[in-house]
């Protein structure tokens, strides 16, 4: 006898194949339910429409005035995002054999009357478009299908191991097949799949509850029925933080293996599959094997394409930074116009040009399909990019690392059993997952019209969990209580005990050697101080931290621009302008008034509260400065130079700099450096061999010959304009010579990190060098 056995998923099928592989003699044919449904019917003279192209057809079908009342934007990008719900709605209606007229009757209060009319028109338009092209879509299969008799006649008996739900259309197909060959169904009933039991009752097969049943659809007879006596013996744990579940899950899996369960007989269920990213992070020994694969959308190439799309959406600064982070230059991108209409071929030329075309098989197959389907469409580059990202969104890359413990979502567990089961996230709203809200009907109308309701769908998921737990030898359920999350009520429906709180061994997540191999300190072996033009700040950086010097001056990595107004630079500019045309002021009021006018000019029209506050704050802080400066000018000082640039040599090395200000009083000169911060480092008088601030010594060297009677001082702008003369200048000058001698003989150095953590406090490279954190 030729027998065909059908299982709910390809994984269940694989397991069965493995089982049969060891047996002798007759082996039946095996097939997954999905494949069987495809093979069992034919669509004469029609080709199935492509899943992306159909969106464009539906958009064409929606080009009538009333459509706007559905509040669906026809803009191609928005339409792409939301069209799924329309397709799902159409597919469900035809699969359940419910017409728009039946829906209208079920809509007793005519709540949805207008929308239903529009949807009906859309449905008809879409149908006509496909018909004209000899195409078909899932929603129209019930209208055109024929049973594939050639295929069915290959088998004397077909047996279906059913889990889950069959629509009325699927039942109708099975009934037709059952008339041509013997069709047996194996099914386990429970209070969670009563909807399916009702469906069988509609066709004359009454099944009791809580039974393992086998019935013959061909003659509608129940062949066997045994009580489901499987019980659930699960331990339930609650933890506080969601991530603590990871540590607990690993501990529990380890205990299961110690108790003798083979790792390949253990499954970890992630009701919210996005949690896998975190499990991947901590699964440093690659024990896990992700049945759902990796999402392509986490790959750098996808992220780069996404960054380009977002940049074209808004062109704002944060998007530019993101582009740069992915190594894409906004200048280079400017060669392309996102608004230009192009063909699909040109679009892929662009992706390739940007170096973002992946050569993995999955992506190349998708590209070929795209080029074929959209060969005669012309839309903008940005729109192509959006649609391509949508396509890539659905691609997952197989997990080939070969971990022995399987990680699954709950849907994939249909038809498979594991000895050890660990389920995390057993929280309300996640187990069962609340299904997406129906956009077009409410539950009441759905129920009246005979469509499955939200609670039917949720019950179905509960049935999957129940079967999985019932068939296991050991099971563990974990939920977290962070953010006031509640355990799933389903726990109580299963009659499981209260959760035990556990102390989590989070050390198993963190007590492992870092995966990052520390980079070696870079070696600079062609250093030549004479070939460099030095400045006081370059010298300071060199002396303070060789690594920072390496980042800034050798690698030329620009410091992060934080977009905040830099207080020091702003005040320097303000004071420079204050003396642009005036060498002195006669009163503090005059200085304050001029400062206020200049500040308005510099800060522009920005009248935000923050800016108003900033102006008031600085005006207030500069009052002391104005007073002290008025006094300074009264005693005869005049500004003779400001922002004076110089280039010169000191001990044979090139130096450049800019002196903030030089004042003169008779034969005396005063070199002034504005300071808005601390002068402590520059003024230090002990351990001069560790001095790094040589600004004043450099100025002294450059100006010493030019003025007879010269002094050097800091003008502390925000500390009442105090003028603080530089201490121990001769000793510091002496130290500068030593430092420069040393520099001249240095031919190479290792860019080590600074010994002291002091310079790291405000270092803009702290993150890069591993001494900083995300603020
Ligand atoms: S963080 Fe510290 S060690 Fe690293 S570059 Fe900056 S100053 Fe040097």
Image (cartoon, rainbow, N blue to C red):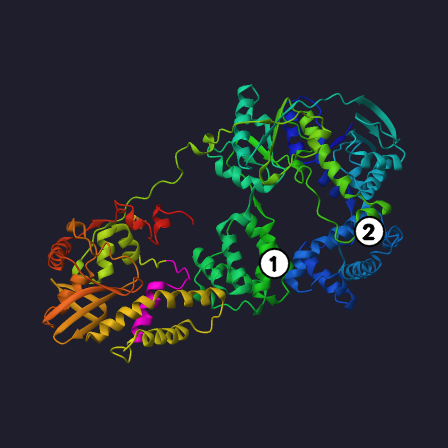
Q: Which image quadrant for residue 46? A: bottom right
Q: Is residue 376 above or below residue 285?
A: below
**Helix, strand or loop for disc 2:** helix
Q: What residue is at 14 percent from the left and 65 percent from the top?
A: 700
**Helix, strand or loop for disc 1:** helix
3D distance between C-alphas at marks 1 and 2: 30 Å
Depth check, mark 1 against mark 2: the one in front is 1
Q: Nearer the viewer, residue 295 or 684?
A: 684
Main SS, magenta region, reads helix
- Residue 352, magenta (yes or no): no
Q: Which region of the structure is painted magenta?
A: 560-578
Q: Which residue is mark 1?
A: 387
- Residue 577, magenta (yes or no): yes
Left or right: 386 in relation to 219: left
Q: Which residue is mark 2?
A: 144
Q: Is residue 349 in view?
A: yes
Q: Position of residue 93 (x, y in %)?
A: 81, 50
**Mark positioned earlier in the residue sequence (1 or 2):** 2
Q: Position of residue 593 (x, y in %)?
A: 36, 76
Q: In the image, which disc is placed on residue 535?
A: none
Judged from this view, the residue extending furthest toward the bottom is 581
Judged from this view, the residue extending furthest toward the top is 259
Q: Which image quadrant for residue 527? A: bottom left
Tell me the quadrant of the picture where the N terminus can be found.
top right
Q: Nearer the viewer, residue 354 or 70?
A: 70
Q: Nearer the viewer, residue 706 or 270?
A: 706
Q: Is mark 2 within 8 Å of ligand 1?
A: no
Q: Which image quadrant for residue 512? A: top left
Q: Is residue 342 above or below residue 210?
A: below
Q: Is mark 1 within 8 Å of ligand 1?
A: no
């Amino acid at each position: 006898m030729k027998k065909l056995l059908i299982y709910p998923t390809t994984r269940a099928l694989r397991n069965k194949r493995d089982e049969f592989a060891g047996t002798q003699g007759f082996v039946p044919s095996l097939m997954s339910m999905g494949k069987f449904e495809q093979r069992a019917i034919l669509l004469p003279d029609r080709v199935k429409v492509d899943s992306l192209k159909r969106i464009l057809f539906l958009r064409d079908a929606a080009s009538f005035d009333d459509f706007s009342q559905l509040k669906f934007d026809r803009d191609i990008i928005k339409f792409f995002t939301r069209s799924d719900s329309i397709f799902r709605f159409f597919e469900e209606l035809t699969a359940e054999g419910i017409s728009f007229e039946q829906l209208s009757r079920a809509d007793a209060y005519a709540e949805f009357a207008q929308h239903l009319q529009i949807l009906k028109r859309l449905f008809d338009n879409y149908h006509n478009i496909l018909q004209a092209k000899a195409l078909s879509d899932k929603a129209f299969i019930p209208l055109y299908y024929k049973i594939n008799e050639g295929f069915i006649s290959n088998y004397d008996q077909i047996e279906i191991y059913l889990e889950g739900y069959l629509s009325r259309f699927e039942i109708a197909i099975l009934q037709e097949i059952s008339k041509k060959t013997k069709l047996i169904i194996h099914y386990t009933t429970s209070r969670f799949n009563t909807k399916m039991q009702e469906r069988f009752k509609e066709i004359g097969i009454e099944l009791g509850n809580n039974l393992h049943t086998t019935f013959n659809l061909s003659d509608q007879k129940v062949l066997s029925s045994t009580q489901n006596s499987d019980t659930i013996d699960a331990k339930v744990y609650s933890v506080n933080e969601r991530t603590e579940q990871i540590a607990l899950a690993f501990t529990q899996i380890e205990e299961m293996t110690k108790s003798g369960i083979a790792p390949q007989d253990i499954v970890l269920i992630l009701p919210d599959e996005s949690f896998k990213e975190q499990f991947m992070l901590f699964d440093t020994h690659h024990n896990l094997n992700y049945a759902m694969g990796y999402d392509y959308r986490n790959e750098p190439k996808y992220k780069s394409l996404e960054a380009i799309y977002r940049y074209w959406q808004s062109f704002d600064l944060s998007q530019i930074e993101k582009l740069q982070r992915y190594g894409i230059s906004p200048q280079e991108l400017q060669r392309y116009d996102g608004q230009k209409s192009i063909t699909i071929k040109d679009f892929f030329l662009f992706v390739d040009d940007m170096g973002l075309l992946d050569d993995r098989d999955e992506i190349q197959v998708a590209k070929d399909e795209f080029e074929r389907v959209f060969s005669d469409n012309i839309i903008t580059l940005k729109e192509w990019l959006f649609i391509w990202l949508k396509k890539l969104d659905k691609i997952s890359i197989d997990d080939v690392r070969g971990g022995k413990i399987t990680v699954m979502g709950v849907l994939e567990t249909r038809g498979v059993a594991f000895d050890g089961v660990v389920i995390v996230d057993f929280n309300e709203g996640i187990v069962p997952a609340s299904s997406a809200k129906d956009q077009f009907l409410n539950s009441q109308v759905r129920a009246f019209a005979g469509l499955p309701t939200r609670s039917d769908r949720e019950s179905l998921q509960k049935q999957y969990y129940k079967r999985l737990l019932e068939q296991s030898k050991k099971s563990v359920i974990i939920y977290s209580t962070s953010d006031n999350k509640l355990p799933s009520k389903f726990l109580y429906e299963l009659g499981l005990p209260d959760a035990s709180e556990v102390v989590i061994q989070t050390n198993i997540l963190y007590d492992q050697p870092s995966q990052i191999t520390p980079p070696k300190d870079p070696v600079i072996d062609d250093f030549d101080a004479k070939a460099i033009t030095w400045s006081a700040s370059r010298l300071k950086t060199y002396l303070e931290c060789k690594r920072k010097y390496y980042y800034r001056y050798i690698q030329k990595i620009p410091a992060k621009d934080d977009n905040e107004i830099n207080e020091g630079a702003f005040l320097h500019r303000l004071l420079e302008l204050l003396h642009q045309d005036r060498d002195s002021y006669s009163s503090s009021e005059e200085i304050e008034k001029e400062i206020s006018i200049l500040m308005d000019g510099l800060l522009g029209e920005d009248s935000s509260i923050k800016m108003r506050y900033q102006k008031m704050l600085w005006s207030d802080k500069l009052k002391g400065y104005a007073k002290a400066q008025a006094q300074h000018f009264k005693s005869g000082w005049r500004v003779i130079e400001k922002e004076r640039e110089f280039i010169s040599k000191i001990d044979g090395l090139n130096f450049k700099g800019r002196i903030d200000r030089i004042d003169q009083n008779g034969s005396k000169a005063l070199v002034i450096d504005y300071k808005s911060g601390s002068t402590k480092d520059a003024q230090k008088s002990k351990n001069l061999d560790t001095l790094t601030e040589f600004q004043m010594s450099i100025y002294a060297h450059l100006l010493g010959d030019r003025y007879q009677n010269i002094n050097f001082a800091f003008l502390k702008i925000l500390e009442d304009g105090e003028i603080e003369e530089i201490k121990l200048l001769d000793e510091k000058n002496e130290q500068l010579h030593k430092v420069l001698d040393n520099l001249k003989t240095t031919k190479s150095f290792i860019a080590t990190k600074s010994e002291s953590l002091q310079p790291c406090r405000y270092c803009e490279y702290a993150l890069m060098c591993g001494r900083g954190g995300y603020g």
